[in-house]
Image: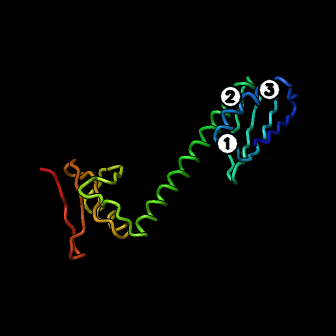
Amino acid sequence: MMNLTITDKELKATDAIKDYVEKKMPRIEKYFGEENFDVNVKIKAEKNIQSAEFFITAKGVNFKAVTEGNDLYASIDKDIDIIESQIRKEKTKKERAQKDGSIKQMAVNGSNAPTIENEIVKYTNYEIKPIAIEDAKLKLEEKTAGSLFYTFINVETGKVNVIYKLKDGLNYGIVEPE
């Protein structure tokens, strides 16, 4: 159940404006179904700029969008787009958290789920910068404990290198392409 409040400041919230906002609300309502949520819309005008501000509260989560422009109706449309995007993002985040939680729970309960083997299960992207070998060694030491290697572009050769700490814990190795 939606509770809609429209307030105005230096701009009259005409019936046409109220009808327009109400006409756009089904785009938001579809995400909340039967649950209660509050929608506060503030419209205002300052000089030649008109703005619409939407503030929605549902299940303790707040969504906000503020858009200014020459056309109040365009601002309302843009705010609806922004709010809808925020709601979808929040919903995806919650679904992912529930999914991750259920997978973790299965692991804790000793489920007979198949073990993933011989597959790439994680990708990491990072920027490779040209630096000297000594600087790369320092960077590897700065990284958090458990970092096994550091990839960099060797300034002397211009080639991608990987520096890693040897098992003795005292020395380093370099991997360099031919």
Amino acid carrying label 3: it is Asp
Decide which of tag 1 and tag 2 comes sooner along the chain. Answer: 1
Report, in whole angstroms, how far the alpha carbon at label 1 lies from the one at label 2: 21 Å
Amino acid carrying label 1: it is Gly
Asked which quadrant contains residue 22, the reply is top right
Disc 3 target residue: 19
Q: Secondary structure at mark 3?
A: helix
Q: Which mark is residue 106?
A: none
Query: How many residues crowd around disc 1 within 10 Å: few (fewer than 14), some, or many (20 or more)?
Result: few
Residue nearest the viewer, comparing 131 with 160: 160
Disc 1 target residue: 33
* Discs 1/2, front: 1
Disc 2 target residue: 77
> Residue at the location (80% across, 39% down)?
4
Query: How many residues crowd around disc 2 within 10 Å: few (fewer than 14), some, or many (20 or more)?
Result: some
Decide which of tag 1 and tag 3 comes sooner along the chain. Answer: 3
